[in-house]
Amino acid sequence: MQADAAALRWPVVNVELGIRGDATLVVSDADTAIALRSGSVPVLGTPRVVALLEEATVAAIGDRLPDGQTTVAMRIQVDHLQPTAVGGVVEAEAILEKVEGRRLTFTVSASDAKGLVAAGKVTRALVEVERFLSKAE
């Protein structure tokens, strides 16, 4: 019975495996490890890489969810592999790999002119916006 109640509370996520989202960033001084206080070098900071990868996952989902629902990041596993200088262009890609209940797992990557900058997985959870926000109060 408990499984049935959970199924009623969380509608099936109606998205196709393989959907893709993209995001692009021209690295500015505000995106550097120094500005983000995550390091002492003037290159693209890892927190900004993670945000760019998340942006690509959000773009993949787009408007596929009903009103009142959204997704939030719940697990991020990323390897930041090489630096990108200020002025560099980084392109991120997210591809939906798996749907388990209300969890959507994306394979993500980011590349610049020199090659792969970051790669990993981002898992997002489907939430009801009002209910989710009430937990933050």
Image (cartoon, helix red, strand yellow):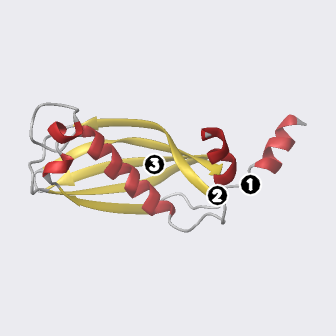
Q: Is residue 55 visible?
A: yes
Q: Which amino acid type corresponds to the residue marked 1 in the rendered image?
A: Pro
- Does the residue at mark 2 contact the one at mark 1 (Cβ under 8 Å)? yes
How many other residues sit within 10 Å of disc 1, few (<14), some (14-19) or many (≥20)?
Answer: few
| Three-letter amino acid code at the position of disc 3 | Phe
First-in-chain label (3 vs 2): 2
Q: Quadrant of residue 3?
A: top right
Q: Which residue is drawn at 71% across and 55% down?
A: 12
Residue at disc 1, secondary structure: loop
Q: Name the residue under label 3.
A: 106
Q: Is residue 113 above or below residue 99?
A: below
Query: What is the secondary structure assignment of the residue under circle 2?
Result: strand
Cα distance, mark 3 to mark 1?
A: 20 Å
**Which numbered tag is attached to residue 63?**
none
Q: Distance between the residues labelled 3 and 2?
A: 18 Å
Query: Which residue is denoted by mark 2 in the rendering?
Result: 69
Q: Position of residue 50 (x, y in %)?
A: 33, 44
Q: Quadrant of residue 37?
A: top left
Query: Which quadrant, please, contains the N terminus?
Result: top right
Instruction: Please state which of the two labelled residues, at mark 3 or mark 1, is closer to the viewer.
Output: 1
Q: Residues within 10 Å of mark 3 (few under 14, many from 20)?
A: many
Q: Distance between the residues labelled 2 and 1?
A: 10 Å
Task: Report the residue at 64% width, 45% height from top.
Answer: 132
Q: Could you tell which of marks 2 and 1 lies nearer the N-terminus?
A: 1
